[in-house]
């Protein structure tokens, strides 16, 4: 009897027991590999975005701070050339003891009309350096005075005079002529005052060697 041709055929793969595991598990393995690849790509993309954003913020902050520190930055103080008429008026108001070469005009702040910086005053007890500023209004005078005294450590003036406090000229003792402040700037005696009639702010500083606040105040009493 001949052998039937069907007996030589390989069994249908769908009938073999191990194909049950191949059919059910292989798709899941492929899905897990695809999920891992997808998740890895998302993590890599997120890392790149974080690094890029962080670098951009650092660059912006660095360049912004550099711009603020530059002369044209927002933190710089605007100055201008002194007003000629105000400068001429201030030269006439200088107290005695300054030689013609001792004082030079300097750039004025936005609130000022003119500013002059002077070297040593030759009178006894005179300051080693002085800054005179002429302004155009009471409000501007207060602003310039506040800025000029921001670096002075305030103390009472000699004789237990209030500082800051009003001061008066002897010729008009009943009339307040301005505000007086005594203190130390970097450990060196300093005095600042306003003059209401002249719309002027003055800051004097003593010599760092051997000077006293009492000596500078005695000079101020005869030169204010």
Image (spheres, helix red, strand yellow):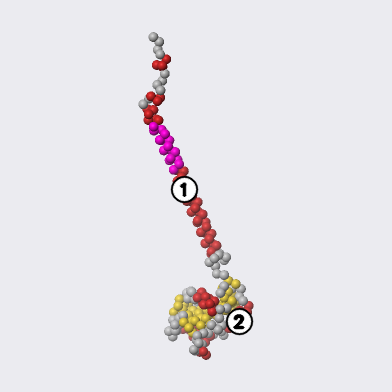
Query: Which label was assigned to residue 55?
Result: none
Residue farthest along the left direction in this orientation: 17
- Secondary structure beneath dot 2 equals helix
Of callouts 2 and 1, which one flags the residue occurring earlier in the amino acid sequence? 1
In the displayed structure, would residue 78 be above or below residue 218?
above
Q: CA distance from mark 2 to mark 1?
A: 68 Å
Query: Which label was assigned to residue 46?
Result: 1
Is 177 on the left or on the right of 35, as rendered? right
Q: Which residue is mark 2?
A: 89
Q: Which x, y percent locates residue 107?
A: 59, 73
Q: Residues within 10 Å of mark 2 (few under 14, many from 20)?
A: few
Q: Does any portion of residue 132 appear in the rendered image?
A: no
Look at 63% across and 77% down and name the residue there: 84
Is 13 on the left or on the right of 89, as rendered? left
Q: Residues within 10 Å of mark 1 (few under 14, many from 20)?
A: few
Q: Which x, y percent locates residue 119?
A: 56, 78
* Camera-side mark, 2 or 1: 1
Q: Which x, y percent locates residue 134?
A: 57, 79
In this picture, which residue range is highlighted in magenta?
A: 24-39
Look at 39% across and 28% down and name the residue there: 19
- Secondary structure beneath dot 1 equals helix
């Amino acid at each position: 009897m001949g052998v039937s041709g069907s007996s030589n055929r390989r069994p249908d793969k769908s009938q073999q027991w191990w194909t049950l595991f191949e059919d059910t598990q292989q798709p899941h393995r492929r899905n897990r590999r695809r999920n891992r690849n997808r998740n890895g790509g998302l993590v890599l993309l997120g890392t790149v975005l974080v690094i890029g954003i962080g670098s951009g913020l650092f660059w912006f902050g660095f360049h912004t701070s550099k711009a603020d520190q530059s002369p044209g930055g927002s933190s710089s103080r605007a100055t201008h050339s002194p007003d000629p008429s105000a400068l001429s008026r201030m030269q006439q108001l200088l107290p005695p003891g300054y030689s013609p070469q001792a004082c030079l005009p300097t750039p004025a702040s936005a609130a000022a009309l003119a500013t002059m910086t002077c070297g040593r005053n030759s009178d006894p007890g005179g300051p080693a350096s002085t800054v005179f500023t002429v302004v155009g209004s009471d409000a501007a005078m207060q602003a310039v005075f506040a800025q000029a005294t921001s670096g002075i450590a305030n103390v009472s003036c000699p004789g237990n005079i209030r500082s800051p406090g009003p001061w008066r000229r002897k010729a008009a003792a009943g009339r307040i002529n301005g505000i007086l402040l005594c203190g130390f700037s970097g450990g060196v005696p300093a005095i600042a005052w306003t003059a209401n009639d002249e719309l002027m702010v003055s800051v004097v500083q003593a010599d760092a060697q051997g000077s006293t606040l009492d000596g500078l105040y005695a000079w101020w009493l005869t030169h204010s």
